[in-house]
Amino acid sequence: MRIVYIHQYYCNPGMAGGIRSYEQARRLVARGHTVDVITTDITPGARDLGWRTTDEDGVTVHWFRVPYNNNMSYARRIRAFAEFMILATAKAARLRADLVFATSTPLTVAVPGVIAAKLRRVPFVFEVRDLWPEVPIEMGALRNPVVQRLAGGLATFAYRNASEVIALSPGMAAGVVARRPGTPTTVIPNAADLDLFAVDEERVRRFRESHDWLGDRPLLVYTGALGVVNGVEYLVRAMRRARELDSDVRFLIVGHGKEWEPTKALAAELGLLGDVVHMWEKVPKSELPVILGAATMSSSTVRPIRGLWDNSANKFFDALAASRPIAINYGGWQADLLTETGAGLVLDPEDTDEAGYQLVRHLRDEVWLKRAREAAYRLAVERFSRDLLFDEFEAVLNRSARRKKQSVQS
């Protein structure tokens, strides 16, 4: 099957970001499919007009430089989304396809996906990574009623034209069906890359020894975006209380985003920066395994907004793959999973002093840590391994193609 795969912010392991699309695309090729990925090049540098094509493990990747970063204004981001929508529509329309697949965000990727699928008379499959416009409306980021209706209409357009929708969490799937009842929807969350995170203990030992501030001290890590939704300052405030209880505990933030400077300023204001709290700029995905391997515990946070509980953040599954307990500060399906299995902590979303106490208590509890590490690894192997979830992903594509073929024949 020839598959056109549209993802505006595709990353490979040499880049900083999630590699879900890379892993799915290369596995599709290994199963005998032909895959063309349409994406943007957002690396810093002069802008060159025109498409650039690379081959990555048999996947043909088409790149067009469209500048984007989390520090852009809302209007500038919308412009980047619209620009890619137009470019991707033109590109996808020229590529041969038996199926067109598009993954959000942004929601605008559905437009080139639907148009290309209709032109080729092939099925369209849409993947929902974030529930738009419901989440930005709940956060207060999307206040204009006209824009809200337009965004809602675009979501309905995507779901109506999709032969099937893939949602990254049960809550996202419920949101899809609530907006358009009867939409065929399958939940396929982000995955644990077991091979990638299998790190040699000697590398971990050298990593710890190479940083004087770390050594053999307990280490909490946060890896990923520092955006408005993430609320990483929650953990910085928790570490103020943690230092009062145990001055040896360390917290490492590895990432990037709009809240980088405010988070850094808060750590400095609380007298934590460079001592208890350390901040590193984003690193390629391939460098994360040794960092998580050196961690005592990982973390994932969001602001106290109900709609954000339905996330499927890569950092959660990376922790499982690395056999590391994970601390979160929200409810929902991931909190239920941690409570059920003992693979991590569910912290109070508001009380950072209590969070600091719980972190110190568990970072020093070797019996609990051993059980949590084992539980995390079991989840990675039995429920969230990349190979296991890829089989479900390919089944959706095959099912959609088969359904389209049957409808044409009838």
Image (cartoon, helix red, strand yellow):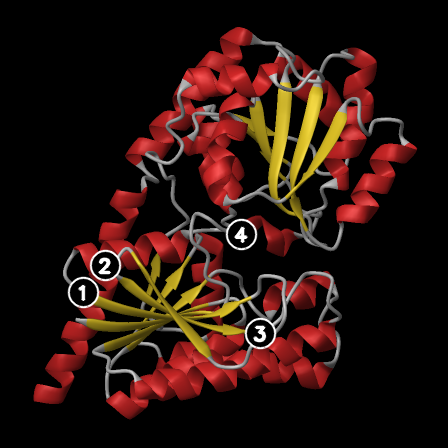
Q: Position of residue 295 (x, y in %)?
A: 56, 23
Dot 4, how many residues are within 10 Å of its Cα: few (below 14), some (14-19), or many (20+)? many
Type of amino acid under label 1: His
- Quadrant in the rendering for residue 345: top right
**Disc 2 vs disc 4: which is toward the camera?**
2
Residue in the picture at 61% in, 56% down = 307
Type of amino acid under label 3: Val
The earlier-in-sequence mark between 1 and 4 is 1
The earlier-in-sequence mark between 3 and 1 is 1
Type of amino acid under label 2: Leu
The earlier-in-sequence mark between 2 and 1 is 2
Task: Tell me: residue 21, above or below residue 359.
Answer: below
Q: Which mark is residue 28?
A: 2
Q: Which mark is residue 66?
A: 3
Q: Is residue 230 left or right of residue 1?
A: right
In contact (CB < 8 Å): disc 2 and disc 1: yes
Q: CA distance from mark 3 to mark 1?
A: 28 Å
**Disc 4 vs disc 3: which is toward the camera?**
3
Q: Position of residue 205 (x, y in %)?
A: 51, 14
The residue at which mark 1 appears reads as 33
The residue at which mark 4 appears reads as 310
Q: Is residue 233 left or right of residue 299?
A: right
**Disc 1 vs disc 4: which is toward the camera?**
1
In contact (CB < 8 Å): disc 1 and disc 4: no
Q: CA distance from mark 2 to mark 1?
A: 5 Å
Type of amino acid under label 4: Asp
